[in-house]
Amino acid sequence: MQSIAKRNSLLVAAAFVLLTSATFAQEKKQASLYDRLGGVYAIASVVDDFIERLLVNDVLNANPAIKEARARVPKAGLKYRVTELVCQVTGGPQKYTGRSMKDAHKHLNITEKEWDAMVADFKVTLNKFKVPAKEQEELIGIVASTKPDIVMAPAAGKK
């Protein structure tokens, strides 16, 4: 009788270890993009570098509406909002509290050329921080999903 109880408790312990291991492996496999990027501090560092690039981008600065918006919106506030947004859309606990992408960009008359300049700067920043290719693809996909709400005007000379 004791050997049956001992065997049963060993089976229960083995089952527990297997289930725990399987659950851990599944959680590790399904880590959010937010977690794979390193969380809020890593994301904030990337956003900081990215915004600094955008602020000196000649293509973007040639747009008077963008230039005017930069004069109105404090750099620190912009970085905060973008960090908040990236954290939320990558699965972090932060909640974006800013305006919709459409509302925030509709008056800027962003062109395809300006969009491409922004994406190029984003890729430079991601490479600088050695963001792995898989995560870069996911981030670029998220950014691309906002394009219809941001690009409002054809590139100069195009119709």
Image: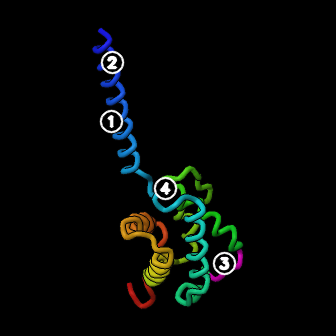
* Of the two numbered discs 1 and 2 in the rendering, the one whose residue sits closer to the viewer: 2
Do labels 1 and 3 touch, CB within 8 Å?
Answer: no
Q: Quadrant of the N terminus?
A: top left
* Of the two numbered discs 4 and 3 in the rendering, the one whose residue sits closer to the viewer: 4
Q: In this view, does 91 lie above or below 81?
A: above
Q: Which mark is residue 131?
A: none
Mark 4 vs mark 2, CA separation in Å: 41 Å
Q: How crowded is mark 1: few (under 14 residues within 10 Å), some or many (20 or more)?
A: few
Mark 4 or mark 1: whose residue is earlier in sequence = 1
Q: Residues within 10 Å of mark 2 (few under 14, many from 20)?
A: few
Do labels 4 and 2 touch, CB within 8 Å?
Answer: no
Q: Which residue in the structure is indicated by mark 4?
A: 35
Mark 4 vs mark 3, CA separation in Å: 31 Å
Q: Is mark 1 on a helix, strand or loop?
A: helix
Q: Is residue 111 visible?
A: no
Task: Identify the residue at horizontal 49%, vertical 70% (top origin).
Answer: 150
Q: Which residue in the structure is indicated by mark 1?
A: 18
Q: Is residue 71 above or below residue 62?
A: above
Q: Which residue in the structure is indicated by mark 2?
A: 6
In magenta, the rendered stretch is 67-72
Query: Residue 29 in the image: x percent, y percent?
Result: 36, 51
